[in-house]
Amino acid sequence: MYADEPNNVGWWDNMVGPGKSLDTDRFFVIGINNLGSCFGSTGPMHTNPATGKPYGADFPVVTVEDWVNAQARLIEALGITQLAAVMGGSLGGMQALAWSTLYPDWLRHCIVIASTDKLSTQNIAFNDVARQAILTDPDFHGGDFYAHGVVPKRGLRVARMIGHITYLSNDAEYFDANTYLLITKALDYFDPAAAHDGDLTRALAGTKAKFLLASFTTDWRFSPECSRNIVQALIKNRRDVSYAEIDAPHGHDAFLLEDERYHRLIAAYYDRIWQDLGRKA
């Protein structure tokens, strides 16, 4: 929640809070804005100290791994040596999975919801079409539209429509255009198995956390098959892994919505984490 906007609710508000599935009466929750975001962290609209102008299209490309490394620096600065869990949905699920491989000793549980270890060719194509809609908007001005006092609304509107085909959210215009480009590229580039000749089992061999994965039957953006592939790789590595496939009609955005079975699943898993913490205390 933004302190200066008291009517705004935090991300995943139906999931995180006192008495909710992720109960903040039990757990201290840290939510971190991604580097390059247009909300809270340094992004393309901020001033580049080297030029005195907004970064715009000169903002460096960031990856899921970059975000996780930045998050780890914050966790370290806070003096935290281990996390009870890292949890994320969709792109956040990619980050949770990356946490388990990059910092295996730092987390006890990894919760990956409606996510994938890499985008399908179809998903990458949708992302590229959305980017081209923004890049070819005359108001984009090569990413320097801030100086012209305009916003590439037409390109963002097309990007929104493309996004609406694959998931319910229609909020592309909510994003800074350069941030939208950065986020979709980070999605495209994520593939932890790439450094292991495409072998996801080898990519996850160094993980130590216990895992929960959840998918939704009508999600063809990140289909249940994507989660099952991760589950199989974890089982081959003899990891403790739970998997739930939830029959929900809301497509990819189901992970953001209120579904009683989904929320009960998360609540039950956090009960397990809480009980494990009590036994280790």
Image (cartoon, rainbow, N blue to C red):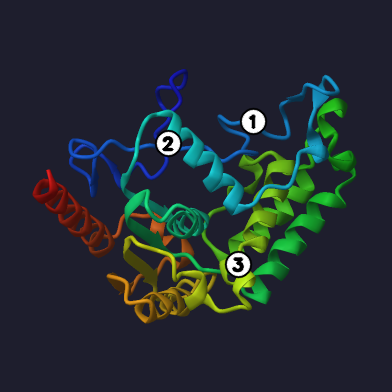
Residues at badges 2 and 1 in contact (C-beta under 8 Å)?
no
Q: Residues within 10 Å of mark 2 (few under 14, many from 20)?
A: some
Q: Does residue 221 lie above or below 235 as drawn?
A: above
Q: Does residue 249 lie above or below 94 as drawn?
A: below
Residue 9: percent from left, percent from top: 39, 34
Residue at x-position 66% and y-position 58%: 161
**Lower position in the chain sequence, tag 2 or tag 1:** 1
Q: Closer to us: mark 3 or mark 2?
A: 2
Q: Which secondary structure, mark 1?
A: loop
Name the image quarter holding the N terminus.
top left
Residue at x-position 54% and y-position 63%: 167
Q: Which secondary structure, mark 2?
A: helix
Q: Residue 42 bears which disc, if any? A: 1
Kind of residue at disc 3: Asp
Question: Residue under circle 2?
Answer: 75
Q: CA distance from mark 3 to mark 2?
A: 24 Å
Residue at x-position 67% and y-position 63%: 188
**Lower position in the chain sequence, tag 3 or tag 1:** 1
Kind of residue at disc 2: Ile
Question: Residue under circle 3?
Answer: 191
Q: Does residue 256 lie above or below 150 as drawn?
A: below
Q: CA distance from mark 3 to mark 1?
A: 25 Å
